[in-house]
Amino acid sequence: MLPENDPLKNKRSEEWAEDFNSEDIDQLYRSKFEHFEATPRPELWQKVQKNLPFSLLLRQHLYQLSKVAAAILLIMMMVGLLEEQLFTHRSHLAAECSDKSAGKANEVPKARMAEAPKEFVLDIEEAPVDKNIGRRLLDKEDPESIDELWAFITDDAEKFSDAFNEEKLQAILQPLEKLPAEGLAMVVPEKKVAPNSDESNDLTIMIPLKVVEDNEVEHLLNLYDQYQQNSKAVHKRSTE
Amino acid sequence: MVTDIQLRGITDDQLIKGCIEGRAAYQQLLYKVFSSKMFGVCLRYAGDFHSAEDILQEGFIKVFNKLDYYRGEGSFEGWMRRIFINTAIEYYRKSARQYRCEELKFPDDHSLSGNALQNLMRDDLLKVIQQLPDGYRTVFNLYAIEGYNHKEIGKMLDISEGTSKSQLARARIYLKKLIQAI
């Protein structure tokens, strides 16, 4: 198997091994080439790509096609859903229109309704509702229930007795409780309006609650001052 | 072992799966990551640069074709390396050029110390190994660098153990003479 011009032909390997350290050569090549890397020309990848077998190319195309198919399927599903929604919406509208147009013609007389069989009506008894559940907790007369409520909020009943000042709380809540939503009613006794009159028809003035504008504040203050001056003058005259 | 692929956030398994699915981007990534390492192998087994490129090309096509057969036993890089070595062996079998018949001229014999050998440049050593007859070069690569024994080499190259041993010895002699000529 050796070539004819092989310089080592007709020689036995043992003959050369005498002054030759083979391990040096092996070691040298192992150290230099065990992790040897070399960058191939960039165009080589294109060659590899071109020479890929048909089965691999088919896989590539199938992968691309599968993506396109998935996208088409998704779009079709979305269109289908939209159409379904539109159809149901339209049918609802049509039903409403037909109900309105049919109107009284389809109305069943009350007497007949009452006579109608009741087999299809599910008679579900409503559970009795205890309307005092909420009130029980807020019952101010029962100090234990207030403690329980506060304990529910703070998870500590002792904190409630420290923090709760009933008088202060009432003072804060009172104006809100007494202000009626429709406005304030001011009753002026008839004697004040016409002191010499014998009749006692009191005058009731309704003051609606409204938001006072900035420009009206000054006007109101002037009116108040006038009222104060007038009342002082009246008081002075009456004392004289 | 952390490979370049893991550094890019893609594991070997993901890369292999992508290539099996035929995704071009994954195939290109696999080529990018391993082409330098595999080209180094090809250059050692090839007689010249162009043959190395041919082997690299054929090797990658084989890798893409046979990825289904990779069962995760051993490293993926090791598996690829074996494919490239087999491709190189087949390449020279096909071309029916088991030995190159160029006459090698050797200079006068000089003794080589270990230090002098270590100082040799890699490019020079590559040129030297590429000058070896194909058979000698293959046996030397398989034995000295890959670490196969003569029995395994015999099976791979379809030669006897004795032939493998004698070819290795001759390869070493050749290399010694050629290195002296540098």
Image (cartoon, coloured by chain):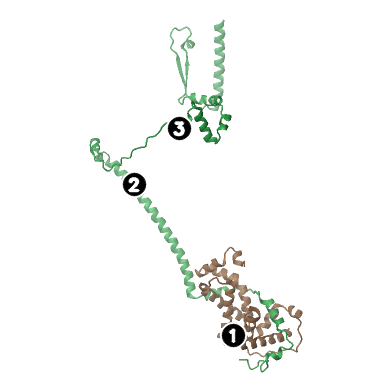
Check contact, mark 3 vs mark 2: CB within 8 A: no
Circle 2 Cα neighbour tier, 10 Å, few/some/many (<14 / 14–19 / ≥20)? few
User: Would residue B17 be seen by someone viewing this image from the given angle?
Assistant: yes
Q: Nearer the viewer, mark 3 or mark 2?
A: 3
Query: Mark 2 = which residue?
Result: A92
User: Mark 3 vs mark 2: which is more N-terminal?
Assistant: 2
Residue in the picture at 52% in, 35% down: A152
Query: Mark 1 = which residue?
Result: B154
Figure quadrant of residue B143: bottom right
The colour applied to the residues of chain A in this rendering is green
User: Would residue B91 be seen by someone viewing this image from the given angle?
Assistant: no
Q: Is residue A120 left or right of residue A236?
A: left
> Is label 2 in a helix, a strand or a loop?
helix
Q: CA distance from mark 3 to mark 2?
A: 41 Å
Residue A88 against residue B151 in the figure, above or below: above
Q: Chain of mark 1?
A: B
Query: Mark 3 = which residue?
Result: A134
* Mark 1 on the same chain as mark 3: no
